[in-house]
Structure formats: C-alpha cells, structure tokens
Image: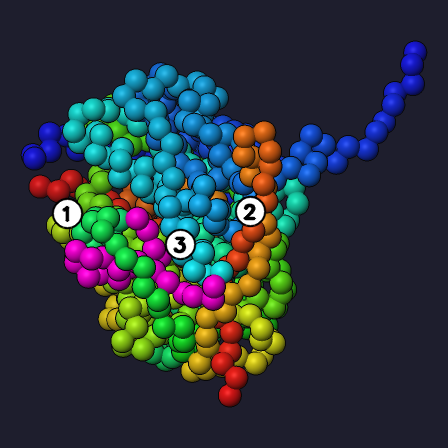
Amino acid sequence: MAQTKKACIVGGGTSKFGVRQATIFDMLQEAANAMSKDIPGLRPKDIDGLIFASTTAGRNSNSLNTAPIVAHRLGIYPSSICVRVDTLCSGSNTAIILATGLIESGISEVVLVTGTEKLNLPQRWESTFMNLYTNDHDWDSAMGLAVPPPFFGMIAQAHMKKYGTTKEQMGAVAVTNYAYGFNNTNAQFGGKTLSLDEYLAARSVCDPFGLNDCCPVTDGASAVIIASEERAKAMTNRPLVYIRGTGQVATHGMSAGWPGETLADWPHLKKAADIAYKAAQLTPKDIDVAQTHDCFTISEIIEVEELGFCKKGEGGAFVASGQIKVDGQTPTNTDGGLLAVGHPYGATGARQAVEICKQLQGRALNQVKNAKFGMTHNLSGVCAQHTVVIYGTEPVK
Amino acid sequence: MAELKITQIVGNPHLDGKYIAEMDMWPLEDPALNRIYPFYDNMKQGRWTTIKCKKCGRISYPPGVACPNCWSDELEWIDLPKTAKVVGMTETLAGAPTGFDSPLIIAWLGFDKAHPLKHLLVRIINCQAGQLKIGDEVKFVTFEVAAHPMDVKKESKVCERVYYAFEPVKK
C-alpha cells in the first residue's frame, strides 16, 4: 500500500531517571513538562493520539487501563487512539512504530508517545520478586529466573567462550557509556565517572558480571511527539527528523524456543535490523549514531555485531577500539545508554528517540558531527523480542 | 479533645491469611484451573512429559492444547528423556527472588540430538555452590511446592502442587 503521509519525531523530554520519590503520574507530568520545553508552543490540544507504554503500571502502580488516566493527568483528549502497550523493555519504541503506522495511514496526525515505570517499590524484595512476572511465568520464572543478570551472565559466558570476548572489552562499554552519561543531568548516574580499574574492581553480581556490567533499577518517564510531516513543520523550526524504517521480531517467550545456535547468537535481532534497513533503504554503514539496548555490557557487544556495525564475533574488539565513541565509526548510546541513564522499561525507547532526534538536529550534548541517520534498538525481557527504528534527516524517497 | 489513638497497622489487615493468585510464583496446576493438567499429574509420578501432534508430528515444549506448528488439537502426551548436559550456568550467591533460596543455581541445558528439545533454562537443586561445572550431566527431579486454596461452592479446598528442576547426576 502506498504511504500517503510521512511520520516525523518532533521532539521530546524525560523526567529525572533514578530511584525516585515519585509516582508514575508524577514522572509522566515531569516528562510532559520537559517535552513542552523542547517543543515551544506545543499545547495538549494539539495532540489527537496517545500511546502509553508501561509494563508494570498495572502491577506496581495499581493502574490497569492506564491510558485514559494518563490522558486525564496530561490534559489531553485523544480522538484517534488512546491505548497502553506492554512490550516490556521496548514499550515506547513499540509505541513509536504504532504511531508511525497510524500517521502514515492518516488515522492520526499528532501522537504523544509516553512511557514510564516505577520499579523501586517500598520494600526492596518486591522489586526483584515482580520480575518473576516479566518472563514466561509458569516455566522460566518457576526456575527462579526473575531479574535478568543470571540469563545475560550465561550469554556473556557463551560469547567469551565462542568468540574470545574479554572482561576488559565488556569494561570498555561500561566506561564509554558512563563517560557519555556524565553530562546528562537526567541520568541515574549523571556526574559519575568510571575507570576500567574501578570497573574491574566492582563487586560481583553474578559471573562474569560486576556491578557496572548491569543497568540499575530505575524509575522514570519519557515523552515524544510523533506527527505527520505537515504538522511537524508547523510545530518546529528545527530540521525535520523522519522515521524511515522499523522492525520488530519476536521468536519465543520461553527458553526452549531460543532461536540461536548458542546464547551468543541473536538471529532475531539480525532479522529485525534487516527488516528496518530494507524499509529505510539504508545499510549498517549509513548509521551515524545508534542507541542500542545496553541492559548489560555484553548486550551492546552482541548488538553492534547483529546490527552489522562490525563482523559477528568482533564486537568486543569493536567497542574496545573506540568505535562506539563520539569520533568512532558508530557512536553508540551517546546519552549514556541504559547503563548510565537507567532503564525504566517502558520509558527507555522514547528516551533513546529523544537522543536520536537531538543528534540528527545537531543539538545533542555529545554531538556526532553531521549525523544524518540514527537508530534506536531495544530488546525485551530475556532477549525474547527485538525492536529497531531508523531515523533520518530525509524521508525515504 | 479526645486523645488520638495510634495503632500499628502494617500492610492491609483485610488480607490477613488470604491467598493472592497475583503473588503466586508457581503455576495453577489443579485441573479446574488449566487444560494441561496431565503435565502436572505426570510430574507428580516423576514423569517429564509434553505434547506430540498427531497431525504434523511436532513435539512442542512447553505443552499446550494446540500444536504451535499446525494448530491441530489432536495431540498425545509423550515422555521426554530426563537427562541433559550443562552448557552454561550461573550462581546467584545472595539476593535470589523471595521464595527461592540462595545460592540460586540456574543452568542453560543442551540435549542429545535425539532429544526433542534443543535448549532449556532450568534451576539446579540438590547441589552446593561451586560444585556444578559446565559439561556436567544433570537429570530431571521433582519436588513439592506450596499448596494454595481454591473456593469450591461454599467450601475451600487445598490444591497440592509439585514442580521440577534438574540435579547433578552422581558420578
């Protein structure tokens, strides 16, 4: 079907990420406030669609069918769509794909994509316990799999064994992303530095991970505006940033369905990327800046491989040689990523989108020179699903 | 003015002693609550079973009531071989989720070529921390887990449950 309209990201903002003394609705209002500063002149009445991303709103914040509540608190009256999506760690990236489809088809004109999670609960045990509900509950979770470090630890072991990846190479991801996040005042670890020696000396979480291999437990919210090209032009004087291509691949929800030969191989990510590249009419070498899902250091190493930024198995050398730094081949996680900013599941995708929007408009804190094409990527849960969105300063012809 | 009376109320006193399905970490195994109960009944006999499709021959795990390959509901229960090799493993020495003891040992299993499964994530029990090694052989083992109440008309019955993990094969 021929697309009749083009979808753009206009701008956005986030709340402060961290261990927050705030409810999801407090943080969503903070994100909306930040977004209103990023898009001067934007008013609630401009918005006709709301896609709200949160996995734990129903459980941790006792709010089922949350989207109408969010609409009320943000003073918007959705007339084309008002819905909550749950794809765990890719929630608001999924919402951006949905918003793009709604805009390209003409159903919506201006969609607010907003996501949040309140993961730190009054008692610490519940924050871990609730993660039992994010896997296939009756099968993998009944094995005690709750928070993801044990699973990704085994992924790291497999990558180290098969491809010779080292702890120092994993450390390069942590050190780079903490450095990127240093100036990010909304990051959980903003203002914090990390040296390779400190990384190597950090307390063990589970083999082979130390504390800085893992993203923290984070509360936060983010918000972006996805609009038709015409409406975007009317809303901003900045260069337009188009959504060029998207891909989302899910292969399994439970470990018995793992699609790779080993845990070090993520064919479902490669497939999601290939679909997005094809739609965007781009190749990996065209991507000037990427926000990939660095829930763990090893995740970013495998992602730069499967996304095609380097050859399979060479992710460790790629990150350690500085190719993810701002002057490297593919600057990655330039706002600090999940490792430094934190990861409130449903808020992460839109947070990444805000950073790519700023990069392609030439106004990011860690600006990549002449960035024209950018990418966001999330994985969900224990690597059950991959979501890729590609942006550009020009639309697909 | 009457003196303010302060009582200590922790949590929600109305929930005292009540079972909350939302907080349950195990499957609801009673035949009144699911349609794959033969899996749990077989597990109570020490058997590890799943479904095989009579139409297309696909063996699926976890079991269900329709074949994920062709959606046929003509299925039969088969026994799965109960041994596997440890391909990857991780030990959580402290901070296992509530309800699971530390050290919590989780393993990524590999199976013989003849086995219907290729991979599986499991918990390893009956094993000390530091004892399990990659390449070790492990076997299916069952254990009792917490029962839960269920309303049946005006009465309440207790639903007893088992679950499974793997344990090291003694050398």
Quarter placement of the N terminus of chain A: top left
Whole-Å distance between the Cαs marked 2 and 1? 52 Å
Residues in magenta? B45-65
Mark 2 belongs to chain: B
Q: Which of marks 2 and 1 is in front?
A: 2
Q: Nearer the viewer, mark 1 or mark 3?
A: 3
Quarter placement of the C terminus of chain A: top left
Q: Earlier in the sequence, mark 3 or mark 2?
A: 3
Q: Residue at x 88, y 20 (%)?
A: B4
Q: How crowded is mark 3: few (under 14 residues within 10 Å), some or many (20 or more)?
A: some
Badge 1 is on which residue? A279
- Residue A85 placement, left or right of A183: left
Image coordinates for residue A267, horizontal then vertical, percent: 25, 62
Q: How crowded is mark 1: few (under 14 residues within 10 Å), some or many (20 or more)?
A: some
Residue A208, placed above or below residue A307: below
Q: Which residue is drawn at 27% across and 76% down?
A: B114
Quadrant in which residue A290 is drawn:
bottom left
Residue type marked 1: Ala
Q: Which residue is drawn at 31% across and 55% down?
A: A252
Mark 1 belongs to chain: A
Q: Residues within 10 Å of mark 2 (few under 14, many from 20)?
A: some
Q: Are marks 3 and 2 on the same chain?
A: yes
Residue B48 in magenta stretch? yes
Where disc 3 sits, the SS reads helix
Whole-Å distance between the Cαs marked 3 and 2? 15 Å
Mark 3 belongs to chain: B
Q: Which residue is drawn at 34% across and 19% down?
A: A78
Disc assigned to residue B159: 2
Residue B51 in magenta stretch? yes
Residue type marked 3: Pro
Residue A205, placed above or below residue B25: below
Disc assigned to residue B38: 3
